[in-house]
Protein backbone atom coordinates (compact mmCIF):
# COMPACT_ATOMS: atom_id res chain seq x y z
CA UNK A 1 0.00 0.00 0.00
CA UNK A 2 1.38 3.44 -0.94
CA UNK A 3 1.88 6.12 1.70
CA UNK A 4 -0.71 8.40 0.06
CA UNK A 5 -3.24 5.56 -0.08
CA UNK A 6 -2.68 4.78 3.59
CA UNK A 7 -3.23 8.40 4.58
CA UNK A 8 -6.39 8.73 2.47
CA UNK A 9 -7.87 5.53 3.95
CA UNK A 10 -7.24 6.83 7.45
CA UNK A 11 -8.93 10.12 6.57
CA UNK A 12 -11.95 8.18 5.28
CA UNK A 13 -12.07 6.12 8.47
CA UNK A 14 -11.95 9.27 10.60
CA UNK A 15 -14.77 10.75 8.50
CA UNK A 16 -16.89 7.68 9.14
CA UNK A 17 -16.09 7.73 12.86
CA UNK A 18 -17.14 11.38 13.12
CA UNK A 19 -20.37 10.65 11.27
CA UNK A 20 -21.19 7.77 13.60
CA UNK A 21 -20.43 9.82 16.70
CA UNK A 22 -22.74 12.61 15.59
CA UNK A 23 -25.54 10.18 14.76
CA UNK A 24 -25.59 9.04 18.37
CA UNK A 25 -26.55 12.57 19.42
CA UNK A 26 -29.41 12.87 16.96
CA UNK A 27 -32.92 11.96 18.07
CA UNK A 28 -34.33 11.73 14.56
CA UNK A 29 -33.24 9.85 11.46
CA UNK A 30 -29.64 10.95 10.92
CA UNK A 31 -28.44 12.64 7.77
CA UNK A 32 -24.90 12.90 6.49
CA UNK A 33 -22.88 15.98 7.32
CA UNK A 34 -22.42 18.59 4.65
CA UNK A 35 -18.84 18.84 3.45
CA UNK A 36 -18.38 22.25 5.05
CA UNK A 37 -19.75 21.02 8.39
CA UNK A 38 -17.65 17.89 8.27
CA UNK A 39 -14.48 19.94 7.68
CA UNK A 40 -15.26 22.03 10.77
CA UNK A 41 -15.79 18.92 12.92
CA UNK A 42 -12.71 17.20 11.52
CA UNK A 43 -10.51 20.24 12.12
CA UNK A 44 -11.73 20.53 15.70
CA UNK A 45 -11.32 16.80 16.34
CA UNK A 46 -7.76 16.68 15.06
CA UNK A 47 -6.81 19.85 16.90
CA UNK A 48 -8.07 18.39 20.15
CA UNK A 49 -6.20 15.10 19.77
CA UNK A 50 -2.96 16.18 18.08
CA UNK A 51 0.26 15.78 20.04
CA UNK A 52 3.46 17.60 19.13
CA UNK A 53 7.05 17.95 20.23
CA UNK A 54 9.69 20.50 19.32
CA UNK A 55 13.28 19.30 19.37
CA UNK A 56 15.85 22.08 19.64
CA UNK A 57 19.55 21.39 19.06
CA UNK A 58 22.36 23.71 20.13
CA UNK A 59 24.70 24.90 17.36
CA UNK A 60 27.81 23.04 18.50
CA UNK A 61 25.87 19.82 19.02
CA UNK A 62 24.16 20.15 15.64
CA UNK A 63 27.53 20.49 13.92
CA UNK A 64 29.01 17.48 15.73
CA UNK A 65 25.95 15.28 15.13
CA UNK A 66 25.79 16.11 11.43
CA UNK A 67 29.53 15.61 10.88
CA UNK A 68 29.33 12.22 12.62
CA UNK A 69 26.37 11.02 10.53
CA UNK A 70 23.76 10.85 13.30
CA UNK A 71 20.03 10.82 12.55
CA UNK A 72 17.24 12.25 14.69
CA UNK A 73 14.98 9.34 15.67
CA UNK A 74 11.51 8.92 17.18
CA UNK A 75 9.71 5.89 18.62
CA UNK A 76 6.19 5.51 20.10
CA UNK A 77 5.17 3.51 23.14
CA UNK A 78 2.53 0.76 23.11
CA UNK A 79 1.26 -0.70 26.39
CA UNK A 80 3.90 -1.71 28.90
CA UNK A 81 6.18 -3.02 26.18
CA UNK A 82 9.60 -1.55 25.53
CA UNK A 83 9.98 0.74 22.54
CA UNK A 84 10.97 -1.50 19.63
CA UNK A 85 10.47 0.23 16.26
CA UNK A 86 12.01 3.41 14.82
CA UNK A 87 8.85 5.34 14.00
CA UNK A 88 10.74 7.98 12.02
CA UNK A 89 14.40 8.88 11.45
CA UNK A 90 15.75 12.04 9.81
CA UNK A 91 19.14 13.17 8.60
CA UNK A 92 18.00 16.62 7.45
CA UNK A 93 17.20 18.03 10.90
CA UNK A 94 18.00 21.61 11.90
CA UNK A 95 18.21 23.76 15.02
CA UNK A 96 14.42 23.61 15.56
CA UNK A 97 12.42 20.55 14.57
CA UNK A 98 8.66 19.98 14.91
CA UNK A 99 7.12 16.49 14.99
CA UNK A 100 3.42 15.74 15.56
CA UNK A 101 0.90 12.92 15.42
CA UNK A 102 -2.81 12.12 15.71
CA UNK A 103 -4.58 8.94 16.94
CA UNK A 104 -5.05 7.42 13.49
CA UNK A 105 -3.89 3.83 13.32
CA UNK A 106 -3.53 0.80 11.09
CA UNK A 107 -3.30 -2.85 12.15
CA UNK A 108 -1.21 -5.53 10.47
CA UNK A 109 0.49 -8.84 11.16
CA UNK A 110 4.08 -9.91 10.57
CA UNK A 111 5.65 -13.34 10.48
CA UNK A 112 8.84 -12.14 12.13
CA UNK A 113 10.38 -9.80 14.65
CA UNK A 114 14.10 -9.34 14.17
CA UNK A 115 16.20 -6.56 15.63
CA UNK A 116 18.16 -4.29 13.26
CA UNK A 117 16.02 -5.06 10.21
CA UNK A 118 13.03 -3.15 8.83
CA UNK A 119 9.47 -4.24 9.56
CA UNK A 120 8.09 -6.74 7.07
CA UNK A 121 4.29 -6.61 6.84
CA UNK A 122 2.94 -10.09 6.08
CA UNK A 123 -0.85 -9.55 6.16
CA UNK A 124 -3.12 -6.99 4.59
CA UNK A 125 -3.35 -3.66 6.45
CA UNK A 126 -6.61 -2.32 7.90
CA UNK A 127 -7.37 1.15 9.21
CA UNK A 128 -8.53 0.94 12.82
CA UNK A 129 -9.30 3.25 15.71
CA UNK A 130 -9.23 3.05 19.48
CA UNK A 131 -12.16 1.04 20.77
CA UNK A 132 -12.24 -1.08 17.61
CA UNK A 133 -11.30 -4.63 16.76
CA UNK A 134 -10.41 -6.65 13.68
CA UNK A 135 -10.58 -10.39 13.08
CA UNK A 136 -7.57 -12.15 11.57
CA UNK A 137 -9.29 -15.02 9.77
CA UNK A 138 -8.03 -18.62 9.65
CA UNK A 139 -6.91 -17.78 6.10
CA UNK A 140 -4.77 -14.91 7.37
CA UNK A 141 -6.91 -11.95 6.25
CA UNK A 142 -7.65 -8.99 8.54
CA UNK A 143 -11.30 -7.94 8.44
CA UNK A 144 -12.72 -4.43 8.48
CA UNK A 145 -12.49 -2.77 11.88
CA UNK A 146 -15.68 -2.75 13.98
CA UNK A 147 -16.53 -1.48 17.44
CA UNK A 148 -15.20 -3.74 20.17
CA UNK A 149 -12.65 -4.13 22.93
CA UNK A 150 -11.46 -1.50 25.43
CA UNK A 151 -12.11 2.13 24.45
CA UNK A 152 -8.43 3.06 24.74
CA UNK A 153 -7.08 0.07 22.85
CA UNK A 154 -6.95 -1.77 19.54
CA UNK A 155 -8.04 -5.39 19.67
CA UNK A 156 -6.93 -8.20 17.36
CA UNK A 157 -9.20 -11.25 17.34
CA UNK A 158 -6.72 -13.85 16.13
CA UNK A 159 -8.32 -16.90 14.51
CA UNK A 160 -5.25 -17.58 12.36
CA UNK A 161 -2.51 -18.79 14.67
CA UNK A 162 0.98 -17.60 15.62
CA UNK A 163 1.57 -14.05 14.37
CA UNK A 164 3.36 -10.86 15.42
CA UNK A 165 0.70 -8.08 15.54
CA UNK A 166 1.85 -4.62 14.54
CA UNK A 167 0.52 -1.06 14.48
CA UNK A 168 1.11 1.88 12.14
CA UNK A 169 0.36 5.45 13.25
CA UNK A 170 0.02 8.68 11.31
CA UNK A 171 2.62 11.40 11.94
CA UNK A 172 3.72 14.70 10.46
CA UNK A 173 7.49 14.75 10.28
CA UNK A 174 10.03 17.51 10.71
CA UNK A 175 9.90 17.95 6.93
CA UNK A 176 6.12 18.44 6.96
CA UNK A 177 5.43 15.06 5.36
CA UNK A 178 2.37 13.17 6.60
CA UNK A 179 2.86 9.41 6.62
CA UNK A 180 1.68 6.26 8.41
CA UNK A 181 4.53 3.97 9.50
CA UNK A 182 5.05 1.22 12.10
CA UNK A 183 5.28 2.15 15.76
CA UNK A 184 5.18 -1.38 17.15
CA UNK A 185 5.62 -5.06 16.33
CA UNK A 186 5.15 -7.70 19.03
CA UNK A 187 8.52 -9.23 19.85
CA UNK A 188 6.91 -12.61 20.49
CA UNK A 189 4.30 -14.40 18.43
CA UNK A 190 0.77 -14.42 19.84
CA UNK A 191 -1.57 -17.39 19.64
CA UNK A 192 -5.28 -17.49 18.89
CA UNK A 193 -7.67 -15.34 20.89
CA UNK A 194 -8.01 -11.64 21.63
CA UNK A 195 -4.86 -9.53 21.80
CA UNK A 196 -5.25 -6.02 23.20
CA UNK A 197 -2.80 -3.33 22.04
CA UNK A 198 -2.86 0.03 23.83
CA UNK A 199 -0.97 2.95 22.27
CA UNK A 200 0.44 5.30 24.90
CA UNK A 201 1.01 9.03 24.39
CA UNK A 202 4.72 8.86 25.11
CA UNK A 203 7.60 8.94 22.67
CA UNK A 204 11.33 8.25 22.73
CA UNK A 205 13.75 10.66 21.02
CA UNK A 206 17.43 10.02 20.35
CA UNK A 207 20.28 10.30 17.84
CA UNK A 208 21.71 7.25 16.10
CA UNK A 209 23.98 6.36 13.19
CA UNK A 210 23.19 3.87 10.43
CA UNK A 211 19.49 3.49 11.13
CA UNK A 212 16.33 4.07 9.11
CA UNK A 213 12.60 4.44 9.59
CA UNK A 214 10.76 1.19 10.49
CA UNK A 215 13.86 -0.54 11.84
CA UNK A 216 13.08 -2.90 14.72
CA UNK A 217 15.30 -2.92 17.82
CA UNK A 218 15.48 -4.83 21.10
CA UNK A 219 18.02 -2.90 23.18
CA UNK A 220 17.90 0.50 24.88
CA UNK A 221 18.89 3.56 22.85
CA UNK A 222 21.91 5.59 23.95
CA UNK A 223 21.25 9.10 25.33
CA UNK A 224 17.53 8.84 24.63
CA UNK A 225 14.84 10.93 26.28
CA UNK A 226 11.25 9.86 26.88
CA UNK A 227 8.62 12.57 26.47
CA UNK A 228 5.30 11.84 28.18
CA UNK A 229 2.30 13.62 26.63
CA UNK A 230 -0.47 11.70 28.36
CA UNK A 231 -1.64 14.86 30.15
CA UNK A 232 -0.28 17.51 27.75
CA UNK A 233 -0.52 18.18 24.03
CA UNK A 234 2.90 19.70 23.40
CA UNK A 235 6.44 19.72 24.76
CA UNK A 236 9.85 21.14 23.90
CA UNK A 237 13.24 19.59 24.59
CA UNK A 238 16.73 21.01 24.00
CA UNK A 239 19.80 18.93 23.20
CA UNK A 240 22.83 20.86 24.38
CA UNK A 241 26.29 19.79 25.51
CA UNK A 242 25.46 16.17 24.73
CA UNK A 243 22.50 16.12 27.13
CA UNK A 244 18.74 16.70 27.08
CA UNK A 245 17.07 19.63 28.82
CA UNK A 246 13.46 20.65 29.33
CA UNK A 247 12.68 24.15 28.10
Image (cartoon, rainbow, N blue to C red):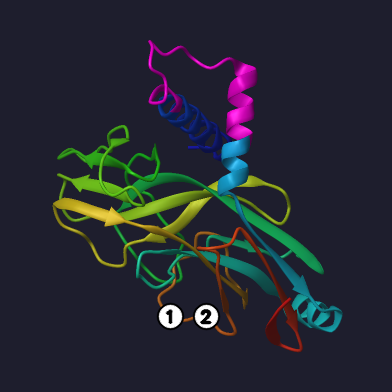
Classify mark 1: helix, strand or loop: loop
x then y, percent, for residue 105: 45, 45
Identify the image quadrant of residue 99.
bottom right
Residue receiving disc 2: 221
Q: Farthest residue toward the front?
A: 27
Q: Is residue 125 magenta?
A: no
Residue receiving disc 1: 219
State the residue in front, 87 or 80. 80
In this image, 155 relative to 137: left or right?
right
| Dot 1 and dot 2 residues touching (CB under 8 Å) | yes
The residue at the point 35 percent across, 70 percent down is 81
The residue at the point 63 percent across, 54 percent down is 100
Task: Judge the density around disc 1: few (<14), some (14-19), many (≥20) Cα neighbours within 10 Å.
Answer: few
The residue at the point 32 percent across, 35 percent down is 145
Q: Is residue 26 magenta?
A: yes
x then y, percent, for residue 201: 49, 61
State the residue in front, 233 or 175. 233
Q: Is residue 121 above or below residue 41?
A: below
Identify the image quadrant of residue 58.
bottom right
The stretch of residues the image draws in magenta is 22-43
Classify mark 2: helix, strand or loop: loop
x then y, percent, for residue 130: 38, 46
Q: Is residue 123 above or below residue 21?
A: below
Q: Farthest residue toward the right?
A: 59
x then y, percent, for residue 123: 32, 43
Amino acid sequence: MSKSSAVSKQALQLHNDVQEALKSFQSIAPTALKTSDYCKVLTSTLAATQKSVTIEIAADDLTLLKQSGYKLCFAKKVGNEAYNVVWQSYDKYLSNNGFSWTPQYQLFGSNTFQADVTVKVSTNIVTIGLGQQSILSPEGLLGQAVTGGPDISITLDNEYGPIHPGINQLSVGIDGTQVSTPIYVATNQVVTGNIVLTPVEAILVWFEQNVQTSTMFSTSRSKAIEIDLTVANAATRLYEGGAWKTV
